[in-house]
Image (cartoon, coloured by chain):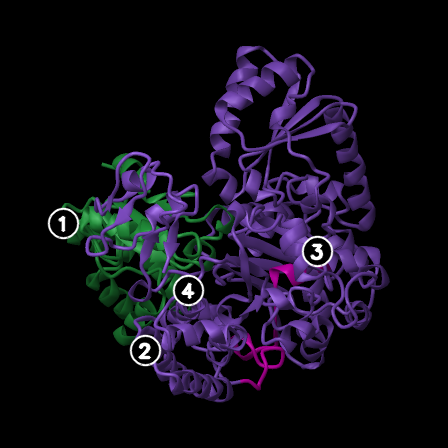
Chain colours: A green, B purple
Amino acid sequence: MQQVAAPPEDERAKTLEIIENNNHDPKRLVKILQEIQAKLGYVPEIAQRLTAKRTNTPASQIYGILSFYNFFRLFPPGRHSVNVCLGTACYVKGAENILKEISSRYELEPGQTTNNRRFSLDFVRCVGCCAIGPVMTVNGKVYGKMKPEEVKDVLGEYK
Amino acid sequence: MTIKSTNDLFALKGKIEKEKFELSQKTQVIVYQGTCGYASGAKGVLDTLNTELHKRNLKDIAVLEHSCMGCCYIEPYISVTEPEGISTLYGYLTAEKVTQIVETHLMGGEIVQEYTVDINIPFFSRQEKRITELLGKIDPFKIEDYIFYDGYQGLSKALGMKQVDVIEKIKRSGLRGRGGAGFPTGVKWNFAYNTESNQKYMVCNADEGDPGAYMNRAELEGNPHAVLEGMAIGGYAIGANKGYIYVRAEYPLAIDILNEAISQAREYGLLGNGILGTSFDFDIEIFLGSGAFVCGEETALLASLEQKRGNPRPRPPFPAVEGLFGKPTVINNVGTLANLPLIMCKGAEWWSSIGSETTKGTKVFSLTGQIARTGLIEVPMGISLNEVVFDLGGGIAGGKKFKAVQLGGPSGGCVPAEHLNIPIDYESLQDIGCIMGSGAMVVLNQDACMVDTARFFLEFDADESCGQCLPCRRGLPLMIEILKRISEGNGEIKDIETLEDIATFMQKTSLCALGQTAASPTLSTIRHFRKEYEAHIIEKKCPAGVCKDLFHYEVDEELCNGCHLCALKCPEEAITGGKKEPHHIDQDKCIKCGNCYHACKFDAVLIK
C-alpha cells in the first residue's frame, strides 16, 4: 500500500498507459482518474492535462471531477496515509481527540503531509467500522477502539 | 459447470449437500472476519488457531473463514461446532485464549466456559434474522455455500413467472425501500416496466455514506449473492439486462467479495446470457464511488455513474422513467435487494406476516455509539426503540445515563427518552420529527451535547453539499455560524427562531434530499432538547460539558478521597492535592481535556 510519488517522466508514461488501456474513452473518466491515483498516489497536473487531451475532454471538467470527490488527491501523499474516522459513532466516542493527538504530535493538519513525507493526515466520514469506534486507518489497515495515548505506538510502527 | 435449468440448480444443491454432510462429520471452527473483525484482531486469532492445530497435528478439525454475523461487540470471535451439531460461541478472544480453547475444548473435549458468549441474551434471541440469516453462516467467497441454502431459487421462480406477476408479488409483500425514503419497491418497478425503451438498467445503491451505518457493508461482505440474485430478479421484472453496483471505495473487502461473487455467478451461468435456460440475459458491473456523500441521492448517483460530478438534478423525471444515460433505471438499496430472493422463495404473505400496520418485514440496524452491545441487528418493523436500545443493546455502556438515540444520520433526528416507546416504522418516526433512515442508530449518553451534535451534522452536510443550489450552499454555513456562536456563549434567544426559519426555508427550497433534510438534526434537537439550547444561551452553560467555553471542571471535596488518579492523568499538571486529601483543579492551567473527569472512579470531578 506504500505510495511514493513517481518522478515526472514516469508520471507521464504511466498516465498515458492507463489512458491507452481505457481506449481514450471519455465514458471512463472517473475510472481513468481512479487508476492514475492508484498508480501514482495522487493526480498530478500533468496527468490531468494528458487525460483532458487524450480523452478530448475540457481540462476544467477533469478538475471539476477531481475537486468534487473526496477520494482524489492533487498533491503527493506521504509514505503512509493516516485517516481518522469522524463518523457519528466515532465522534461520540472521542475521535476528535485522536485527530488532535496526531495533529499536535506530528504538527500536521488534516489534508497535509509532514515535511519528511512520512505521514499524510486526513479525516474520513465513516469507514463502516462503527461498532469498534473510534477508528483510524493507516495505509488502509483499520485500528479500532483507539485511545489518544495509543497513537504514538501505532504510528511509531510506520517509519 | 453451467446451470442451464432449475433442475440443474437442484442437482448442484444435492451435490453440495453431500459435501456439507461430510464436513459436518468433523469438528468445525469458524473464524468470523468482516472488516471490523480484521480490525479487532481476527487475523491474529486465525493464525494462532492454525499454528496451534498444526503443532498438535489436529488434522481432522476444519477451520472455516466466514464473515461477521453482526455481534461486533464480542470481536474477535469464533465458534466451535461439534459433529453432533452442538455449537459454542467464544468471544473477546486473544492468542492466549485461543491456545487454551484448542487445548481444553478441541483436544480435551471440554468447553472453556469463561470465554463463551451466551447466545440466549436478547441481543441474539430477539432478532428476526432474514436477510442477515446467512451472515457468518456461509463463506462469502463460495457461491456453493449460498446455493446450499436455496440460493438463486428465488431467481429461478421469478423466471418461471410473467414479469407483471413478479412485480405484483413484490407489491403484495409491501416491501418498501430500505435506503431510507421507504418508497414501495413494486410501484417503482412498475414505472420502469411500463416505460418503453430499448435499454433499461438496474442499479444497486451501495454508496453507504451515512456516518454510523454499516449494514450494507456487512450484508455485502457476508452474503453478496443475495444482492446479485435480487438485482437479477429486478432486472427480469423491469426488462433490464444490465446492472451496476455503485459501491463505496472505502469498502475494499466488500469490493473483493463482490468481484469474486460476480465471477463465480458468471461461471455457473447465473449471470450472463440465457440465465437458467431462459432467454433472459443479465450482467452486473461494479462501479467504485469516490467518496461523495451526496452520491447516495439517486440522481447524483446516476450522474456519478455517467462519469460526471455527482450533482443531483430535479425530479421528475424520475429515474424509473428517465435515468442512467436517459434510460429507465431502477435504483434499489442493498437491503431492499437482499429481501427479494426471500419474497420470491417464501412468498409475499410469509414476508409480510411480521411488521407494523404500514411497514412490513424486518429492518437491519447498526447499533453503535455509547451502548453496551454494538453490532448489526435485524428486528421486525414495529419493535420499539426502547426494546432495541435496552434489551438488545443492553443499555448504556459504563453506567451512564441515556440521553438520545440518533436515527437517520445527517438527514435524521434525535429521539429522547420520553419517545422511546414508539414503534419503529416510517410513519411513527416521522411524527416525532425523525426518520428511519438507512439504519444507523447511534446511541448518545449524558456526555453528548445536543448543540454540538447538531453542529456536527451541519458541518458534515456543509462539507458534502454539492454547492449547486443556494439554500443548501448558503443555509448550512449560516446555521453553523449561529450554532458556533451559541456554543461559545454568544448566542441570543432569538437565534433559535432564526435557526428554525433557515431550516424551514432549506426544507422547502433545496433541490435534493441532502439540502431538504440537512437541517433535520438541528430541528429535532431544538424540538426535543430546547432547554439545552436555552442553557447555552441564557445561563451560558453547557450541561454536558462539551462546549469548552461554557463549563469548567471542579473537584467535589466531599466525594474526592485523594486517590490522585486524576492528577496522574492530567497532561497540564493542573491538579494538585496531597495523598488522601481532596484535590484541586487550577482553572488557569486546565485545558478541559476531560481526562480527570473520565478517570475518576468516584464521580468526584464535576462539570460546572
The residue that label 3 is drawn on is B379
Label 1 vs label 2: CA separation? 33 Å
Mark 4 or mark 3, which is nearer to you? 4
Disc 2 marks which amino acid? Answer: Glu
Numbered range of the magenta stretch? B315-339
Q: Quadrant of the N terminus of chain A?
A: top left
Which element type, helix, strand or loop, lies under badge 4? loop
Letter of the chain that mark 1 sits on in the rendering:
A
Q: Which residue is mark 1?
A: A115
Q: CA distance from mark 4 to mark 1?
A: 41 Å
Residue B580 image position (x, y, % from top left): 33, 35
Q: Residue at x 73, y 72 (%)?
A: B186
Query: Which quadrant of the structure image shows residue B562?
Result: top left
Q: Nearer the viewer, mark 4 or mark 1?
A: 4
Whole-angstrom CA distance, mark 4 to mark 3, is 34 Å
What amino acid is at disc 1?
A: Asn
Number of the front mark, 3 or 1: 3
Residue A131 in the figure: left or right of residue B235: left
The answer to which of marks 2 and 4 sits earlier in the sequence is 2
Share a chain, discs 3 and 1? no
- Asked whether residue B511 is in view, the answer is yes
